[in-house]
Image: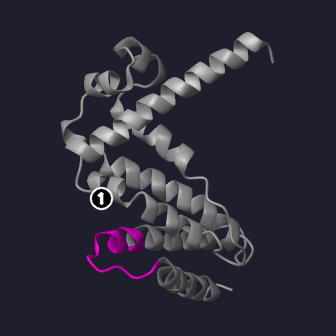
């Protein structure tokens, strides 16, 4: 790759990172529903035209960062991604809580469900042949995981991540085992 392309890619990545960091900081400080593109640009030190070169709006910016952040490693075994996923959600608890009840919550939950569904699919595919039953199993487990994590986040006294992982694994393995 030519040096000029690498430097352009680095500048693009830097700009997007600055915008994402500004968006997250402002969301935590002020709440999502009061944010404007101009506030994000001012915080990031980026012009509005640069913002719109990369993103259509603040929701698209948020979701782009969301996808980058959700690279989850498997720790082994069936549903081995639960622990790293729980730890990720726990580490970003303040942001997730700041987004609950906002205009973009539905889009964030849909994107999160997509990420979890991809992870679940890999494990369910080993136990259930392709078809509607497998699709239903993936949606069931991913949806249950999504709702359980949301429930866990809002609890004033939350279970330890290891305990939540055990619950999710037991429930999910049990549900999939019913389909064999």
The magenta stretch spans which residues?
A: 148-160
Locate the C terminus by quadrant.
Answer: bottom right
90 or 176: nearer the eye? 90
Q: In this view, does 9 lie above or below 92?
A: above
**Residue found at x 64% / y 87%:** 177
In the image, is residue 159 part of the stretch drawn in magenta? yes
Residue 42 locus on image (x, y percent): 30, 22
34 or 131: nearer the eye? 34
Residue 12 locus on image (x, y percent): 56, 22
126 or 15: nearer the eye? 15
In the image, is residue 98 part of the stretch drawn in magenta? no
Residue 22 locus on image (x, y percent): 37, 34
Residue 128 in which image quadrant: bottom right
Q: In this view, does 162 lie to the left or right of 130?
A: left
Which residue has dot 1 on it?
97
Q: Is residue 103 visible?
A: no
**Residue found at x 52% / y 81%:** 162
Number of numbered markers: 1
Q: Is residue 94 above or below residue 24?
A: below
**Residue found at x 40% / y 82%:** 159
**Residue found at x 47% / y 55%:** 112
Residue 92 in which image quadrant: bottom left
Locate the N terminus by quadrant.
Answer: top right
Residue 6 locus on image (x, y percent): 71, 19
Mark 1 secondary-structure assignment = helix
Q: Can residue 134 be seen in this view?
A: yes
């Amino acid at each position: 790759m030519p040096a000029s392309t690498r430097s352009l890619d680095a500048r693009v990545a830097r700009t997007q990172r600055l915008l994402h960091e500004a968006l997250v900081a402002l969301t935590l400080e002020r709440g999502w529903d009061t944010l404007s593109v101009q506030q994000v640009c001012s915080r990031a030190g980026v012009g509005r035209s640069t913002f719109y070169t990369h993103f259509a709006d603040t929701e698209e910016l948020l979701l782009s960062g969301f996808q980058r952040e959700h690279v989850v490693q498997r720790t082994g075994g069936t549903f081995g991604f639960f622990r790293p996923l729980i730890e990720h959600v726990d580490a970003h608890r303040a942001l997730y809580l700041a987004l609950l009840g906002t205009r973009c919550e539905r889009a964030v939950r849909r994107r999160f469900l997509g990420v979890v569904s991809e992870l679940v699919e890999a494990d369910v595919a080993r136990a259930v042949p392709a078809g509607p039953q497998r699709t239903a199993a993936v949606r069931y487990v991913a949806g249950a995981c999504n709702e359980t994590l949301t429930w866990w986040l809002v609890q004033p006294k939350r279970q330890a991540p290891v305990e939540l992982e055990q619950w999710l694994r037991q429930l999910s393995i049990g549900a999939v085992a019913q389909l064999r």
